[in-house]
Image (spheres, rainbow, N blue to C red):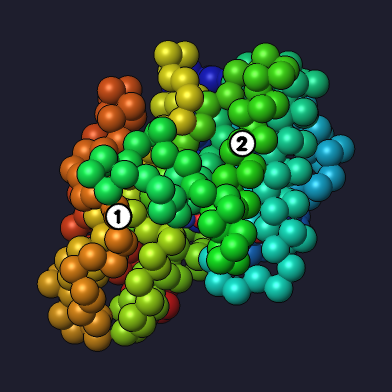
């Protein structure tokens, strides 16, 4: 295999990050992956055991609020896939400290480090949580990259994770504009599929709760699923493709939690999945193949049925269900 350039993956230890690291190694890249605690095997072991890791993976300990730790991790890399960000959709006690500060300041620190190191492109992992909730979006228009989360609505209703992702993405665009840095953004939907790390992340925990019978409708957090392997591939496509620019919705379909739940119930009747009202995401217009910009770059998305099967089989194999 042709040796490729070196890229840094922040949040390399996480659910999405570890799939990105694995795919980069498979494709011949040398990878600087960041973790929060180098001495914690739960963050490092699954990365160190990947094919190619021995020769082409280097781990760095960073804290998103510590600029110097990030600068060391990006030294000598051509590109950065900035995935690290706290991902808490349940109750938070101190939203500024737990979510907003690491998301926003962390993103700016990564972009500052990219600029100082002469990095050629940064792919920033935003979310559909920078697109919804947006109660003002017209109910007869399919959501796309023009759609932005209503920050005031989030603040008034104490919905802090979407607030943190929206503020971080806006800060990234402002920094890129002011500093002439090449930034592209990916906005994944609810990411599910095989789990590589030893722990469970927020979106797979949300799916597990559904299988356990939880009737939460995730009104402000869901507009459709996407397979974690597609999300990993899309990150690399956006990094490699100079024509890519702006935001990129990354989702198999736009649907309601009720659609997703009923498909899961049909495939796995042995779990006590509740039935939901038809429209659990009011104002969200359903759509097939909504990620037009990524499809134009060559992506074809793994269908919902397979996302559910891969997620359930992984939860089973890790004894989460
Ligand atoms: N999962 C989804 O459905 C989804 C959808 C759209 C967007 N996203 C975005 O995708 C990214 C990864 O999410 P995920 O689902 O893979 O969650 P995850 O497994 O919780 O990964 C989050 C990563 O961020 C790192 N991190 C968090 N706070 C940090 C800090 N202060 N300093 C350094 N690193 C820090 C974590 O490190 P540790 O492992 O050491 O804790 C972890 O590697 C996030 O930006 C999230 O907002 C996720």
- Res. 139 in view: yes
Mark 2 lies on residue: 170
- Asked where in the image residue 117 lies, by quadrant, the reply is top right
Dot 1 or dot 2: first in sequence order is 2
Question: Which residue lies at the image location 48% right of the left edge and 25% below the top edge?
Answer: 246
The dot on residue 283 is: 1
Which of the two residues, 196 or 65, is positioned nearer the viewer here?
65
Give the left or right position of residue 151, taking residue 117 as reference: left
Give the left or right position of residue 239, taking residue 306 as reference: right
Q: CA distance from mark 1 to mark 2?
A: 24 Å
Residues at discs 1 and 2 in contact (Cβ within 8 Å): no
Question: Which residue lies at the image location 43% right of the left edge and 60% below the top edge?
Answer: 221
- Res. 14 in view: no
- Asked where in the image residue 104 lies, by quadrant, the reply is top right
Question: Which residue lies at the image location 43% right of the left edge and 61% below the top edge?
Answer: 220
Circle 1: element type:
loop
Which of the two residues, 250 or 128, is positioned nearer the viewer here?
128
Circle 2: element type:
helix
Work out which residue is located at the far left of the displayed protein and give it: 266
């Amino acid at each position: 295999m042709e040796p490729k350039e070196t890229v840094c993956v922040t949040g390399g230890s996480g659910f999405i990050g570890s799939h990105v690291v694995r795919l980069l190694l498979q494709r011949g890249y040398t990878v600087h992956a960041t973790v929060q605690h180098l001495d914690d095997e739960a963050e490092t072991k699954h990365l160190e055991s990947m094919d190619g890791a021995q020769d082409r993976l280097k781990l760095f300990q960073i804290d998103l609020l510590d600029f110097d730790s990030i600068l060391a991790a990006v030294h000598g890399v051509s590109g950065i896939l900035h995935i690290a960000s706290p991902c808490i959709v349940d109750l938070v006690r101190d939203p500024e400290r737990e979510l907003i500060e690491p998301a926003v300041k962390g993103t700016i620190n990564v972009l500052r480090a990219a600029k100082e190191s002469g990095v050629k492109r940064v792919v920033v992992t935003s979310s559909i949580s920078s697109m919804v909730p947006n109660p003002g979006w017209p109910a007869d228009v399919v959501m796309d990259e023009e759609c932005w989360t209503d920050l005031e609505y989030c603040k008034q209703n104490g919905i802090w994770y979407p607030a943190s992702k929206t503020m971080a993405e806006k800060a990234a665009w402002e920094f890129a504009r002011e500093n002439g840095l090449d930034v592209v953004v990916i906005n994944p939907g609810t990411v599910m599929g095989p789990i590589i790390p030893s722990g469970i992340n927020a979106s797979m925990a949300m799916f597990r709760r559904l299988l356990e019978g939880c009737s939460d409708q995730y009104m402000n957090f869901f507009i459709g699923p996407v397979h974690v392997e597609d999300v990993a591939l899309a990150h690399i496509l956006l990094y490699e493709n100079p024509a890519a620019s702006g935001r990129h919705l990354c989702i198999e379909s736009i649907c309601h939690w009720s659609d997703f739940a009923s498909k899961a119930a049909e495939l796995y009747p042995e779990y006590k999945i509740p039935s939901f009202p038809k429209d659990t995401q009011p104002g969200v217009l359903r759509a097939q193949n909504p990620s037009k910009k990524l499809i134009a770059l060559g992506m074809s998305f793994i269908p919902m049925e397979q996302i559910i099967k891969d997620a359930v089989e992984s939860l089973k194999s890790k004894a989460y269900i």
